[in-house]
Image: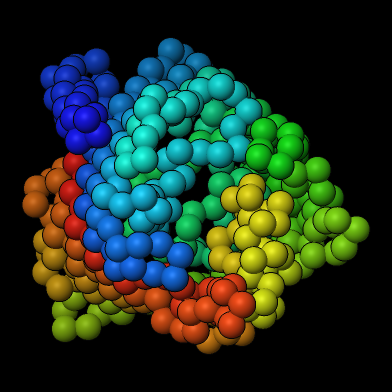
Amino acid sequence: MRIADWVRGSLFLMVGAAVAAAQQPLDLRGYYLHVALAADSGSFNPRGITDVQRARLMLHPVAGPLSLDVAYEHTLSYTSAVGAAGTFGGLGQALGGTEWLPLQGTLRRSQHLEWRHRADRLSLRYAARHFEVTAGRQPVSWATTLFLTPADPFAPFDPSEPFREYRTGVDALRLRAFPGPFAELDAVLRPADTPVGKTVTGALRAKMAVGHWELAGWGGVVHDDPAASVALTVTVAGAVLRGEGVVRRSGGLTVRRLAVGADRSFTVWHRTLYVVAEYQRDGFGAARPADLIRVVFSAPAIRSELQTLGRDVAVAQLRYQLHPLLSAAFLTLWNVHDGSALAAPALGLSLAGNLTARAGLFAGRGPALLPGGAPGSEYGTVPTAAYLSLTAFF
């Protein structure tokens, strides 16, 4: 019976994709992602196979200064073993977790199957010459660095996420003003209903460009905590240097979170090599393995504010174009304190203008468990997993 449910879900996603493709004159666009994952047994999960399918339909009608942004998606995941790795590498962001509006839910759940749906975009925008107002579920990003973004108070990506086509929408009221050609003011008010209580995030951000510099700063409250941030970007000798930091008053303590990084493109053997390196120090993170469990059950982690669990983490990515249709990437995350690391090599192949295949691997290295059974490191408990994916736009 569980297999039958999975088959029916798969047919629903495929039929939805076909119907959307047949209605292109209505400007109805779509996205389909299918990921098959095989994971070895780890410290906290058995060996198993996971199949994840995600189908998304999008519509963006415009009438003068008014526009409506709509995106509706279904996510179907099937796991062969109870407790095996389910959503991975950020795929769980499609399910949400801190929404205020009731625009999502679970259609079916069993030991092996989970079928959920969600309106990931449902917002109305009014755009004038020097300002615009948007209300509803929408993507909001105040990130400056590319992978580790502690000063982004909304919905940051998992740094190991291989599928970044769409940022998760949040429920917010947003006002953007453009006082000059190189200046922007951005005010966001976001109520959230989190597993640890209802909160409000409200902040005003100013951003401006001066020569080769881009400067930004914001102040307000993040999940009811007073906070302020500064960020900068500058280009030096062909490399882009980025940095962002935030100071926050949380639980009676002052918490500092910052990230710095650099990225640059090189030409190697007539092909493009893109390199990114970043370092983050997060006051919410664990300074030693014994603190990992506490961090996992902390309010910031439950609210999906933390991209990593460690206090000091570095990330590096190399991406190289092997052929006009084939690219290779290697990403690694390193916890500086416990010495553990996550390696994620991948290959991407363009099968057509709107169809891409990807194969990759996740492998954690480091101490697995402490004598009492607690995690011995951040990435030492991550099982080795291989995945194959197919992405289609229509």
Which is more toward the observer, 234 or 344? Answer: 344
Left-right relation of 261 to 184: left
Percent of width and height locating residue 315: 48, 75
Which is more toward the observer, 49 or 11? Answer: 49
Position of 124 relative to 262 (above/below): above
Position of 268 relative to 321 (above/below): below
Percent of width and height locating residue 44: 45, 65
Q: How is the image coloured?
A: rainbow
Q: Residue furthest top?
A: 63
**Residue appearing at x 49%, y 54% in the figure:** 157
**Residue appearing at x 90%, y 58% in the figure:** 252
**Residue appearing at x 38%, y 17% in the figure:** 61
Task: Work out whether residue 382 can be spotted.
Answer: yes
Q: Residue furthest left?
A: 351
Percent of width and height locating residue 64: 46, 14
**Residue appearing at x 41%, y 17% in the figure:** 62
Quadrant for the C terminus in the image: top left
Position of 262 relative to 227 (above/below): below
Location of residue 288 (image quadrant): bottom right
Location of residue 275 (image quadrant): bottom left
Left-right relation of 37 to 377: left
